[in-house]
Image (tube, rainbow, N blue to C red):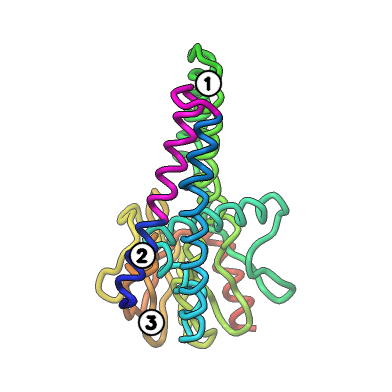
Amino acid sequence: MTERTVRFVHRAALVLTVVVACTNAVLAALGVLAPATALKVWLGFELPLGILVLMVGALRIRVLRRSGTAWVGVLDELVGRVPATLMRAELRSYRALWSLIRGRRVGAGPEVTTIGYTRGTMSVPIAWLVASVIEIAVVHVLVPWEWLRWTLLIVSVYSLLPIVGWLADRVVNPHLVTREGLVLRSGHQVVARIDADNLQQCIPRRRFQPTETGVDGEVLFLPGPDGTNLDLVLAEPVDVLLPAFFEHRRRPALVSRFAIHVDDPVVARRVLGAALHA
């Protein structure tokens, strides 16, 4: 049996196990299946199939690790690139929330200065979040069936956590300034690393367009919803990697100028001048 066939069988069995388990749980909750029948289905079908999926998965992990595949690649191979990306994004959002609650910034330290870029960018997401919370409360009051009311409440709250985590991810991953240079980030993704002696100018400049991340000629734009407010001019071009939700869709580019959005361009200019040219 080829690796491609094993991969297909493993993923098909995994999907089938999840679908059957969810269907069994829903039918039991609706009263279509008696508890004893649901238990028999679980013992006779779901449990053996789940054990088979775990055994095949363990063997595949062993083979992949022996071939030198990193853990990130192992997860991609086991469940598929898109599901693996969604799983990592969800876990990352929880980690970002925990860091935000603790007041921590990823990469910050005694000799590291952070530059935030979220001020003025959170109003629309937060407004949408508040509206969602109100909608959840209204639905919870209006739905007459208690089991459905609580199910919708749990699902709705759970669906909001990744969104809140995405917002937290941008807050806890600011740009970093050290004696060695500047690290530009978009959430957890590093966009560019600029050596201290390569940063030639730092100019506060307001642009209202564009509002989407992209490259125009040799300029990389990292805007907020109302554009950019700080230009960085380099002596020599640097390689950058544009942010994207899916890592495999991040595009490389070579740029010699950055137009970015920061919380306070005047303060950022002063910080960059003091740290990079000390």
Tell me the SS state at disc 3: strand
Cα–Cα span, label 2 and label 3: 14 Å
Residue at 57% x, 55% y: name it: 171
Residue at 56% x, 24% y: name it: 150
Residue type (three-letter) at the residue carrying disc 2: Phe
The crowding category of the residue bearing disc 1, from other C-alpha atoms within 10 Å (few below 14, some 14 to 19, many at least 20), is some
Residue at 43% x, 66% y: name it: 78
Tell me the SS state at disc 2: strand
Q: In this view, does 61 lie above or below 145?
A: below
Residue 273 screen position, x and y as percent: 58, 76
Q: Main secondary structure of the magenta part?
A: helix
Residue 21 screen position, x and y as percent: 46, 42
Residue at 30% x, 71% y: name it: 5
Residue on which the image places disc 3:
239
Q: Where the N terminus falls, by quadrant?
A: bottom left
Residue 40 screen position, x and y as percent: 52, 38
Residue type (three-letter) at the residue carrying disc 3: Asp
Which portion, as a residue range, is magenta?
14-35
Res 244 seen here: no
Tell me the SS state at disc 1: helix
Residue type (three-letter) at the residue carrying disc 1: Arg
**Residue 187 has which mark?**
none
Q: In this view, does 83 lie to the left or right of 253?
A: right
Cα–Cα span, label 1 and label 2: 45 Å
Residue on which the image places disc 2:
221
Res 2 seen here: yes
Q: Do the residues labelled 1 and 2 touch (CB within 8 Å)?
A: no
Q: Closer to us: mark 1 or mark 3?
A: 1
Magenta stretch: residue 31 in it?
yes
Q: Is residue 259 left or right of residue 183?
A: left
The crowding category of the residue bearing disc 2, from other C-alpha atoms within 10 Å (few below 14, some 14 to 19, many at least 20), is many
Residue on which the image places disc 1:
149
